[in-house]
Amino acid sequence: MNRILIAAWCLAGLALLLVLQVHLLPALLAGLLVYELVHLAAVVLSRHLTNRRAKLAAVVLLAITIIAVVVAAGATIVMLFRSDAGSLPGLLGKMAEILESTRDSLPEWMAISVPDNVDALKDSLAHWLREHGSELQLAGKEAVRGFAHVLVGLVIGALLALREATSNAAMAPLAEALAGRARRLAEAFRRIVFAQVRISAINTTLTGIYLIGVLPLFDVHLPLAKTLILLTLVVGMLPVIGNLISNTVIVIVSLAHSADVAVASLVFLVVVHKLEYFLNARIVGSQISAKAWELLLAMLVMEAAFGLPGVIAAPIYYAYLKDELRNTGMV
């Protein structure tokens, strides 16, 4: 086998591991997102523009527009979660009140872990904040740093897409091999993320129909329904585990009305959860020729090694690895 190709594989693998090790996954995902969007749009522009300067100007304008749209979309989601219509703190507070009101009906082993009232919950939270104040300050700094990494990743992704769309310069063998690995990773990202967007949209639509369509027909109006729908859309970008998070929150909020509504919500969400397994197998699995259990196993291993970032990166990394192995005829 070509030594240059083997060297490119080793360097690519080392780079992917370092991305997780030094916490640069947000920058990588942001860069890949902008790269794919700009690249797809640039392909369309190239069919209609032959002049190099016109193509360059069009791609630059396109890249700036896409970066602005991505940043605006992220800011909009944050604002919605902080607003009255989509208050995440309000949702957490409502869940605490619901758990408090249902404490007496819980099994004894579970009730011991639930605070007696909201004041007790606030005292426990204040005590936890005092004990972990330094960690929270560090988390705040890391959030700012992560946002900066995302912005840099957006710019790098746009610049790479710009270079590919406008440059025809020849590259040295190792550089060409590394560029091939990068293109294959970008293709894996596109297949996984765009497929997951479709799955999340379907799950969110079904959840929205249930919360604001079906339940009101039976005179059941759950609190913060819009927040629940938005939460389902956002966390739905995480394969499988995102659906579990939204399902848990919806069932707890359903307890605010009655145990019967909570059971109905659980049954509905179990059906949707099973549907997601089917969708993952058909949509995501078909994109990378992988079964749902393969993705789950990859997520389990990556979570054990790298935590939550590993869960997010697992489908993309696995798709890339399988694509490389398939290209060589090993699988």
Image: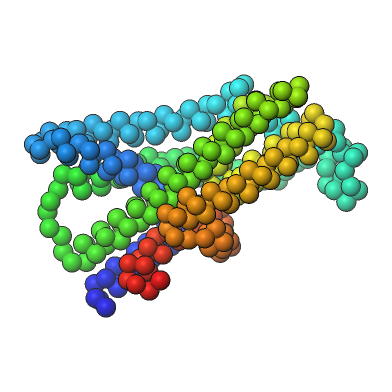
Rendering colour mode: rainbow
Q: Name the outermost residue toward the left.
A: 51
Q: Report the residue at 30% width, 61% height from top.
A: 181
Nearer-the-camera pick, 108 or 319: 319
Q: Is residue 274 left or right of residue 289?
A: right
Q: Name the outermost residue toward the bottom.
A: 1
Nearer-the-camera pick, 147 or 303: 303
Residue 144 at least partly seen: yes
Q: Is residue 46 above or below residue 4?
A: above
Q: Is residue 321 above or below residue 209?
A: below
Q: Quadrant of the N terminus?
A: bottom left
Total labels drawn: 0
**Place of residue 214 in the rendered image (x, y in percent of width and height, measured from the top left):** 68, 28
**Place of residue 131 in the rendered image (x, y in percent of width and height, measured from the top left):** 70, 46
Q: Is residue 44 above or below residue 188?
A: above
Q: Report the residue at 51% width, 43% height from top.
A: 199
Q: Is residue 238 left or right of residue 265?
A: left
**Place of residue 241 in the rendered image (x, y in percent of width and height, measured from the top left):** 60, 49
Give the quarter of the image for residue 207: top right
Q: Quadrant of the C terminus?
A: bottom left
**Place of residue 75 in the rendered image (x, y in percent of width and height, measured from the top left):** 46, 30
Q: Report the residue at 55% width, 42% height from top.
A: 236
Q: Report the residue at 13% width, 35% height from top.
A: 49
Q: Is residue 98 left or right of residue 201?
A: right
Residue 90 at least partly seen: no
